[in-house]
Image (tube, coloured by chain):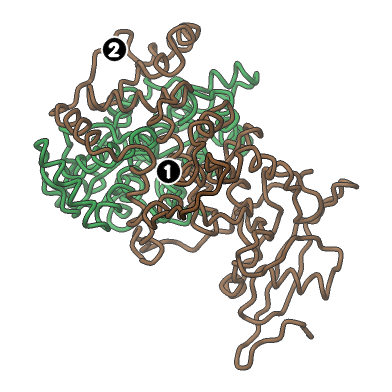
Chain colours: A green, B brown
Amino acid sequence: MALRRVAYYKGCLASLSAKELDSSTQALAPQVGLELVELQAVTCCGAGDIHEAEPDYYLHLNARILAYAEAAGCDTLLTICNVCTLNLRQANWQLKNDDALRQRVSDNLEHVGVPPYSGNVEVRHLLWEIAEGEGYELLKAAAHKGLKGLKVAPFYGCQILRPSKLLGFEDPDRPWSLERIIEACGGEAIDYPAKIKCCGFPIIAAREETALGELIQPIEQAKEAGADALVTPCPLCHLSLDAWQSKLKAATGKDFQMPILHLSQLVGVAAGLEESELKFKRHVVPVTPVLEKLEV
Amino acid sequence: MSTNIAPAPGSSTIELALKIWRYDAETGEKELKRYEVEAPDWVTLLDVLDIIKDQQDGTLAYRKSCRMMICGSCGMRMDGAAVLACKTRMYDIAKSGHEPVISPMGNLPVLKDLVVNMDPFWGKIRSVKPWLDPGYDEVAEKERIVSQQQMNVIHKEALCIMCGCCVSECNSMESDPEFLGPAALAKGMRFVGDARDHDDVQRLNKYNEEHGIWDCTRCYFCNERCPKGVDPRDAIAKLGAESIKQGIDHDMGAKHAKWFVRSAMTTGWLREEELIPKTQGYISAIRQAKFALGLIKHGKVRPVPVPHVAERVGEARALYNLVKEQGRDGALGIVQGEHALGRIEFTEEAGARENAPEIQPGVEPPPAEG
């Protein structure tokens, strides 16, 4: 099977605190038909923060990432983070649809030694690559070990759904992609209202109390709906849902012990990836109950 | 059946059913009631409510006035999503057989059925000083001309009809009811960005207070729900950028945002381990030592952070310096992209939808609460 070459932008978290997301994505990619060309000379997308602090710099940083993807000869830039996805798609849309703006930004890139960007790259999240089309067919074949009816709560996070005019893959109020993947892997998708809401991550350092008020909703609802684990396509959601559960316990007295899986880990388990690739030991909330249920 | 909304010559009628959360704050009684209606095929949700009220149940309460998307009275939820009832055509829903659930907007107390108490909403709008302060009392003899280019800066914010749809689903406000919220902050940007207003520093200081711009959790529900294209989240980002441009950066949210800029310039990647101390200050961060140790134990953070430096990071630094020289600081950096973003409304692009399975029934909205 010929693999499709895509530029791979792993972003900040998968480079450091969520290395397990990077390793599981790299291990899974060939099984779903992707050859990852990892971009080395790229920076943070700004995560919405640079967009809010220095928006013109945000546009240039993202243009630079797109330019290196284009220079690598790829028409697709693969992301594994919601926030990277929105930031890059927003900048890409602006650059593709405003010739004067793209010319100015491209001139600036060239001025500092970056290849110019001509607007021929599409930014796509891994979730979209495996939820339909060839990626989905390959996923079904790869997930041979199944999930033995594991009850999984899909948690989308915000910036892969909204604003839908920039993301546009699925109905932001009735998304289906995670459910489809969970079921293709042999799991049971749990439904609950907060699956499309915010995890609170962007303000968790500056407004922890407000953020915890958001964070508790998906975890509590998923628990009540009988979920064994929660899966998310975003490492920022993963970090808040996983690492801040201890703070929820301190604030509310509720100890949910809800295992949080990256999308690539959930599919990876069904596809039989090894612990050295899945790296569940890096999670704060133990994933052991899930692995025991799956007899891994 | 007879109807006071007659089908136009040549048009047909549709049959549809919907469920409405009935609620009375005085008695505390609530009930999800189902209604069946036959109506002209062009009806909006508001027309359907009118037919129900006229022919089936005169006690149904909802707000309306202009019927043409400009008064902002008929905000309510359909299947959990805030909409203007007068903008929502029912034809496709009726044809699909789906029975939508209609409920009042969120984040505001319900008075009766679909009517919410807008007092908290107006209180927040008033608190951002929603009027122009030109900084002079005497009217000059000569007209002060404002260019179209200057007005373009606040074009989107000026479209707001204050319907409350953005506030309805604001995730931060659900958690912190005192958050000024998307409507009031977009209104604030409408004046901060107005070339005729001379009070922007005081305004920005006010919006930088505890329940202000840095409370926004970037859930983007406001942009998604706004029926007029205001994009309140973008307005909040513009206020953040204007604040930082003016040196109003004492809030932890501003420090958090600035640390990303600093990281991109120096190492390319986010210097994650320093983010909390740089946001909250080292003393506050030390108080969280136990939490940090938990993260270290699982390899989430390293005890001694060695910078993770991107290749060719010098380019990112040079770009920063170049961009700063060109002076598109503050809100202008966001406004410059709006020309392209405005074009999305008129195209099919955005994303692929092939092989999408049938739309699943919507999430049931929470019961109405007083």
Q: Position of residue A23 (x, y in %)?
A: 27, 30
Q: Residue furthest front?
A: B141
Check the image and name the residue furthest to the bottom: B10
Q: Residue A88 got which mark?
A: none
Q: Chain of mark 1?
A: A
Q: Which percent across, then down, holds residue B70?
A: 61, 64
Residue occupied by mark 2: B305
Q: Nearer the viewer, residue A157 or B72?
A: B72
Task: Label 1: state its secondary structure.
Answer: loop
Q: Residues within 10 Å of mark 1 (few under 14, many from 20)?
A: many
User: Where does label 1 land, which residue?
Assistant: A159
Mark 2 falls on what kind of element? Answer: loop
The residue at 24%/41% (across/down) is A29
Query: Distance of mark 2 from mark 1, alpha carbons?
Result: 29 Å
Q: Is residue A6 toward the left or the right of residue A228 in the image? A: left
Q: Nearer the viewer, residue B322 or A194?
A: B322
Residue B64, above or below B312: below
Amino acid at circle 1: Gln
Q: Is residue B364 left or right of residue A86?
A: right
In the rendered image, which quarter is residue A35 located in?
Answer: top left
**As drawn, B218 above or below B154:** above
| Label 2 chain ID | B
Q: Is residue A221 visible?
A: yes
Q: Residue at x 79, y 43 (%)?
A: B370
Amino acid type for the residue under numbered disc 2: Pro
Q: Quadrant of the N terminus of chain B?
A: bottom right
In front: B99, or B76? B76
> Viewed as shown, does residue B188 lie left or right of B312?
right
Q: Is residue B17 above or below residue A194?
A: below
Q: Residue at x 43, y 38 (%)?
A: A232
